[in-house]
Structure formats: structure tokens, C-alpha cells
Image: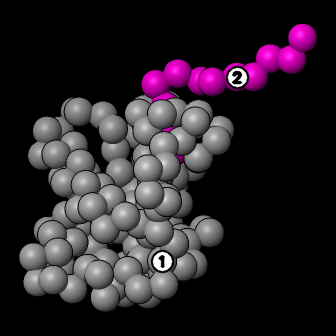
């Protein structure tokens, strides 16, 4: 496994994904990896390369521009590059994911972001994820 450090990726799980359904397999792979990680109740820092050019450029720099390594999902745990969907699902099937996630911040039981309600579609200013609508507080 290669050693990289995504920005603010120390002691975190960082996933570069896409929410666009342009390529069905890529979209399904992103959902499978996200579900596998969320099933272990870890906080996931998801970086959607289809919604943010900065994330796409950041991934390109991390992966040294290798084309096949630019196809999401790309998973990093505590700064270590784990791989794409195939490699992550192999780690899950081998029962090694929990060991890999040692020391990573866990999600609180029953927590749902107030900003996006867990929808994760457009940028959410509360959890740095995504949301289907922007929630803004207005003070009169």
C-alpha cells in the first residue's frame, strides 16, 4: 500500500467519489465502498470529484496523474492509500477493515447532520458533506 497524505487526511478516512451516474459501475462502486465504511461506523470525509474541481485536481496530484488511479472511488485511511473498490472490498471480505480503521474517529450513534439530513447531494456547510438543499439560518 502506498503512503500518501490527502489534505487534512491524518487519522481520517478520506474517499474520493462521484455522485454522477454517468458510468453506472463507477457510481455503484462508490456506493458500495461508502456503505462498507459507514457500516463500520466511521466518520468518512467524502470528496466528490464530480462536484468540486479542487478535489479532482487534489486526487490527480496524490495519484501522480495515473489515469487508472483517477477513477473513483479512491480510499485513504490515516493517509495510507488503500485502493479502489476492488481493493477495499477485498479488505472487507478478508475481515481486515476493522483493524485498518483502528484509531479513526467513529460516528456517534444516531447522529444525522442537521445541515443535510444525511442526504449528501450538494455541499453541506455543517458536515462538509453534501445535501439536497442548503439550510440557512436567518435572524430577524
Residue 131 magenta:
yes
Query: Left of 93 or right of it: where is 97?
Result: right
Query: Compared with residue 64, is residue 112 higher up or lower down, i.e. above or below?
Result: above
Look at 31% across and 68% down and name the residue there: 40
- Say what secondary structure mark 2 lies in: loop
Q: Main secondary structure of the magenta part?
A: loop
Query: Is 65 situated left or right of 97 in this image?
Result: right
Q: Earlier in the sequence, mark 2 or mark 1?
A: 1
Can residue 56 be seen by looking at this rendering? Answer: no
Secondary element at tag 1: loop
Q: Nearer the viewer, residue 83 or 102?
A: 102
Q: Is residue 121 magenta?
A: no
Specify few, some or many for label 1: CA neighbours under 10 Å numbering under 14, 14-19, or 20 or more: some
Q: In this figure, which colouring scheme has been used for the structure?
A: one colour
Q: Quadrant of the N terminus?
A: bottom left
Which residue does the image show at 47% across and 69% down from the upper left? 106
- In this rendering, position of residue 86 left or right of residue 115: left
Q: Quadrant of the C terminus?
A: top right
Residue at left offset 54%, top offset 41%: 113
Vertical relation: 58 (above or below) 4: above
Q: Is residue 12 above or below residue 109?
A: below
Q: Position of residue 49 (x, y in %)?
A: 43, 47
Task: Magenta stretch: give its range.
Answer: 129-140
The residue that label 1 is drawn on is: 104
The picture places residue 19, in percent across and down from the top left corner, at 33, 38
Write the residue at 23% across / 48% down. 31
Amino acid at each position: 500500500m502506498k503512503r500518501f497524505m490527502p489534505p487534512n487526511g491524518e487519522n481520517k478516512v478520506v474517499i474520493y467519489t462521484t455522485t454522477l451516474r454517468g458510468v453506472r459501475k463507477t457510481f455503484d462502486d462508490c456506493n458500495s465502498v461508502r456503505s462498507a465504511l459507514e457500516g463500520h461506523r466511521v466518520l468518512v470525509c467524502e470528496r466528490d470529484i464530480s462536484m468540486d474541481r479542487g478535489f479532482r485536481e487534489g486526487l490527480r496530484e496524490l495519484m501522480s496523474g495515473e489515469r487508472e488511479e483517477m477513477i473513483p472511488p479512491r480510499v485513504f485511511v490515516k493517509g495510507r492509500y488503500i485502493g479502489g473498490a476492488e481493493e477495499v472490498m477485498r479488505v472487507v471480505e478478508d475481515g481486515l477493515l476493522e483493524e485498518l480503521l483502528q484509531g479513526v474517529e467513529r460516528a456517534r450513534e444516531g447522529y444525522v447532520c442537521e445541515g443535510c439530513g444525511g442526504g449528501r447531494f450538494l455541499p453541506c456547510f455543517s458536515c462538509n458533506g453534501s445535501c439536497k438543499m442548503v439550510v440557512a439560518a436567518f435572524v430577524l
